[in-house]
Image (tube, helix red, strand yellow):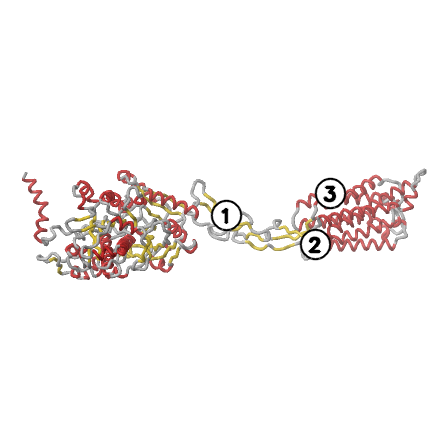
Amino acid sequence: MLSFIFVFLVLKLPFLFCSLTDPKCFLRTKDKKNKDGDKEVDCFFSIYTKSGYIKNDHFGGNLDKKLTTKNIHLILSLYYAIEDINRNPYILPNMSLLVKVECNLLAKKSKIILSSKRGDYFPNYDCRNQRRYLIVLTGPMWLPTAMFGPLLYISRTPELYYGPFHPLLTSYDYFPYLYQMANKDKSIVIAMVSLVIYFSWNWVGLIISDDDQGLQFASELREEMQIRSICLAFITIITYDIKLFFKMADMYYNQIMMSLAKVVIVYGDKDSHLQLNFRLWQFLDIRRIWVTTSQWDMITSDGKFLFNSFHGIISFSHHYSEVAGFRKFIQRMHPSNYSNTNSLAKLWWLNFNCSLSSSNCKKVKNCSEKQLLEWLSRYQFEMSMSDVSYNLYNAVYAVAHSLHELLLQQVDTWTNNAGEGLELDSLQVVSSLKNIQFVNPLGDLVNMNQKAKLDIEYDIFYTGNFLQSFGLKVKIGKFFQYLPHPHQLLIADEMIEWATDVRQTPPSICSTPCNPGFRKSPQEGKAACCFDCTPCPENQVSNMTGMDYCLKCPDDQYANTEGTHCISKIVTYLSYEDPTGMVLASLALCFSALTAFVFAIFLRNQDTPIVKANNRALSYCLLISLFYCFLCSLLFIGQPHRATCIMQQTTFAVVFTVAVSSVLAKTITVVLAFKVTVPGKKMRWLLVSGASNLIVPICTMIQIIICGFWVGIAPPFVDTYGHTEHGHIFIVCNKGSVIAFHCALGYLGSIALGGFIVAFLARNLPDTFNEAKFLTFSMLVFCSVWITFFPVYHSTKGKATVSVEIFCILTSSAGLLLCIFAPKCYIILLKPKRKSFHKFTHTHAKV
């Protein structure tokens, strides 16, 4: 028993000392340390009215030491709005708005529910003070609003929720008298994705709370990111189950630390364990860039931001104009400026080391504005309104405008009952409230109709630790939902360079973007943002960083060795300046000159038997045709044109037909000459009449007809080939109709084959001037050359194709010239005394 008394006295001792040293007004120990930082607690504001202008009465009994800086800031925003309205002669004239403040009700939940006097907490009428409460402003946390909503419903008291929008509170079945000031963040997903694109991040983490709001956000974010080719590195869903939360705490931490994502988006209910998760991470070195909404811009008990990171926070806040008078209002919050300031004096006594008069608890001593500014700085107190404060500010004005509209509707009743005051129904207030639209003192349009389409704007802030005891919050950009896509996001680069180190942080990407000349190659089983870089295939390029595929160069261009851009191909053809063209042209001219020389020899010795043998006229025709055969090869050299392309093939076909048919006619002449010498045969008239000479024009006419159909149906034309040699584009003559080309060659080959067969059969005929052996050998050379031509021709490309065709023309023509006329020229020039092939062959046979 003695020990129990001793413990009781020890525990009671501080209170005894406190009661001796502190004023009797406040029998509580001082607690100068802010344990909650700027963590918010719920605050319900019951609005009522009084006739006339009531000065400063709303400060009485409202401020308490348990409030955090966030709530003090919130209450001051409320007081500022009420004071502005009460001083404004154009809104609620001869009437003042007043408020009853109840904070931290969630902590008193069990006490309220069990209390038989629940009306003391949520009345719609206070009998003691003759107050009729018109509406209750609830927030900033949605959970107390939802929990205490049924109690307000019982008293038929409307609620105006000023906290962040929450979909659960939109249910009319559960909350028929509740209205939300904030609109749903329908564009926050697009705004965040636009920011991610601006900084070229494509590998981003996501942390959400395990509720409908967080899951809906994750679904919309994933869909928008897929459209913009951005990937989610991980999705961490923070559970509401406290036991499961602590079991999974290490997994949450490892998930974010093991990921390559340097940027993490945070979204969810601030009242969930998501906040607890980051409070546990306060002392861990998590170097990430946090992207979130303004409600997460919080300060912890050690004076640091909730998202404590070297790289800071980028937050999105609904745009609103600056409330210029709010800063001055805070700075003049000295108790001496107000009457009936019991609670305000308590606040100063608790926080600013002020002393109180023992006789008057409302009077503070040894306090200055300097001490107030030091306190504001120490707790990083914002001198401007936050999103929630601005919602509360507009909520008060919305109530005032709604009451003003009701007063205008009941102006006659008001005049008759001026002495008694005007009775206003709460439900009338909320009915009028839902359709009210007004311009607040800042110039911003406030539309209480949530179904109306609003032009949403976001301000983008960067928040970080400037020094150990100071924070830095800078506006770095804006997002306009109503503008077209490329112009929605506006970022001030100079502010980013000055305030942040975002530009110097490692990029939040899974794979380094591929350089020009490479394309992305997806990694099997991984997200699209994880890839390897593969060089572009031949003749394909990628001229920008991070291209998904390579682009094929046009036919007249080719890719450089690095594969970064296309280069125009060099236009080329078999020209006279080309070594091959020069050699072939020289051969053609030499052989044509040689043919002319042989023709001249034959003309000079036209009366000799060796020239007359086997039809002198056919020999002349053959020499002339061979002359043109050599010259027609020049048509294949030089830049092709439409005319030269047509002339190439038709001239070649016709002159070679003349040459080959001349050989055939000469062979038939040999056969006829032998047959004439045989007794009993009556074919002398065929030889004498020169019937064999008709073979040449007949065969030539048939070839001309074939060429005519060729030119008429599908003539040769100028064509280009860009794939035969790298970096070159060849100009060649396309044959046009392939069938006509092969018909012309086939017809020419059939004449040559016929001439070869006849000459071969007549090679051993015992005629004095028989040249059948030489004709046989010449046709053998001719057929061999053109049989070889086809496979070689079809296996070559570019200039080689043209060169092969010219070479075959020259070779076959030279074969005919040399095999037929070389022996005769040898006899004429070197053995003029020998008059016959018989002697020539007999002489050589003896050697």
Q: Which residue is mark 2?
A: 642
Residue type, mark 1 in image: Tyr
Q: Residue furthest left?
A: 2
According to the picture, the residue beneath numbered tag 3 turns out to be 787
Q: CA distance from mark 1 to mark 2?
A: 39 Å
Q: Position of residue 613 (x, y in %)?
A: 88, 47
> Is mark 3 in CB contact (under 8 Å) with mark 2?
no
Query: Could you tell me if the residues under marks 3 and 1 are in contact, i.e. CB atoms within 8 Å?
Result: no
Residue 566: percent from left, percent from top: 55, 54
What is the number of the mark on residue 549?
Answer: 1
Q: Residue at x 61, y 53 (%)?
A: 728
**Which SS class for mark 2?**
helix
Front residue of 598/105: it is 105
Query: How many neighbours does mark 2 have within 10 angstroms: few (below 14), some (14-19), or many (20 or more)?
Result: some
Q: Amino acid at mark 2?
A: Arg
Label 1 SS? loop
Quarter of the image where the N terminus is located: top left
User: Does the rendering let one see residue 323?
Assistant: yes
Above or below for 524 versus 486: above
Depicted 325 relative to depicted 507: above or below: below
Is residue 296 something that shows in the picture?
Answer: no
Q: Cα distance, mark 3 to mark 2? A: 28 Å
Residue 825 at x, y percent in the picture:
84, 51
- Position of residue 330 relative to residue 162, above or below, is below
Secondary structure type for disc 3: helix
Q: Is residue 597 left or right of residue 287?
A: right
Q: Amino acid at mark 3?
A: Ile
Q: Residues within 10 Å of mark 1 (few under 14, many from 20)?
A: some
Sequence-earlier tag: 3 or 2: 2
